[in-house]
Image (cartoon, rainbow, N blue to C red):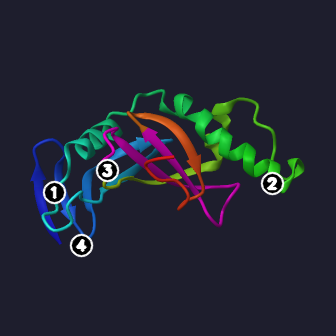
């Protein structure tokens, strides 16, 4: 495993496909890792947009759960409609959705031609144990959520 000290992010370890920061992000009461898939796999370099996305992930505001809840509630309600109202309770407040979410890690994928700094929060969730949850953050703001594998940088 290759290790380097990045001037912005501190120690990073390359596992063969991703850089993993030693620094963690506190999200929903859990310290989660940040991993970055290099823009250029051969040189293992990060693009400036990826670096921006990492910085945004590392500096999420204290009220991130309140701000991100609407994007997650949308997924919760779609799933609730699919399986039936009686199996999943109504949420008293949108922030209550986080009681059913267990964050795993943040990933910054290659951005290609995309110029908006974007990262994905991967998590387990009580309403979709099989597929989990991914929440997309653009410019530091959650704008969409879906089951893992169904949400990318665009769309």
Please name which of the two marks, 3 or 4, marks the residue nearer to the observer. Answer: 3
Q: CA distance from mark 3 to mark 4?
A: 19 Å
Q: Crowding at label 3, few (<14), some or many (≥20) Cα neighbours within 10 Å? A: many
Magenta residue check for 71: no
Q: As rendered, which of 78 and 29 lies closer to the eye?
A: 78
Please name which of the two marks, 2 or 4, marks the residue nearer to the observer. Answer: 2
Dot 2 or dot 4: first in sequence order is: 4
Q: Secondary structure at mark 2?
A: helix
| In-image side of 10 versus 67 (left or right) | left
Q: Secondary structure at mark 1?
A: loop
Q: CA distance from mark 2 to mark 4?
A: 39 Å
Dot 3 or dot 2: first in sequence order is: 2
Q: Secondary structure at mark 3?
A: loop
Q: Residue at x 23, y 43 (%)?
A: 51
Contact between marks 4 and 1 (CB within 8 A): the answer is no
Image x and y of residue 63, in percent = 48, 27
Dot 3 or dot 4: first in sequence order is: 4
Image x and y of residue 17, in percent = 27, 69
Magenta residue check for 112: yes
**In the rendered view of the protein, which quadrant contains the N terminus?**
bottom left
Q: Crowding at label 4, few (<14), some or many (≥20) Cα neighbours within 10 Å? A: few
Q: Residue at x 75, y 36 (%)?
A: 91
User: Residue tagged by mark 3?
Assistant: 111
User: Residue tagged by mark 2?
Assistant: 82
Looking at the rendering, the stretch of residues picked out in magenta corresponds to 111-137
User: Residue tagged by mark 4?
Assistant: 16
| In-image side of 24 versus 100 (left or right) | left
Q: CA distance from mark 1 to mark 3?
A: 12 Å
Residue 45, which numbered label? Answer: 1
């Amino acid at each position: 495993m290759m290790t380097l000290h990045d001037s912005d992010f501190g120690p990073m370890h390359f596992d063969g496909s991703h850089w993993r920061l030693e620094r963690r992000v506190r999200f929903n009461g859990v310290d989660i890792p940040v991993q970055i898939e290099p823009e250029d796999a051969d040189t293992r370099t990060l693009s400036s947009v990826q670096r921006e996305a990492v910085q945004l992930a590392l500096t999420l505001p204290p009220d991130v759960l309140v701000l991100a809840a609407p994007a997650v509630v949308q997924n919760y309600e779609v799933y609730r409609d699919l399986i039936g109202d009686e199996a999943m309770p109504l949420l008293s407040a949108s922030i209550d959705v986080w009681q059913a979410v267990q964050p795993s890690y943040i990933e910054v994928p290659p951005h290609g031609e995309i110029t908006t700094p974007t990262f994905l929060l991967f998590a387990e969730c009580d309403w979709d144990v099989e597929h989990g949850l991914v929440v997309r953050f653009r410019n530091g703001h959650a704008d969409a959520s879906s089951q893992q594998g169904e949400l990318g940088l665009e769309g």
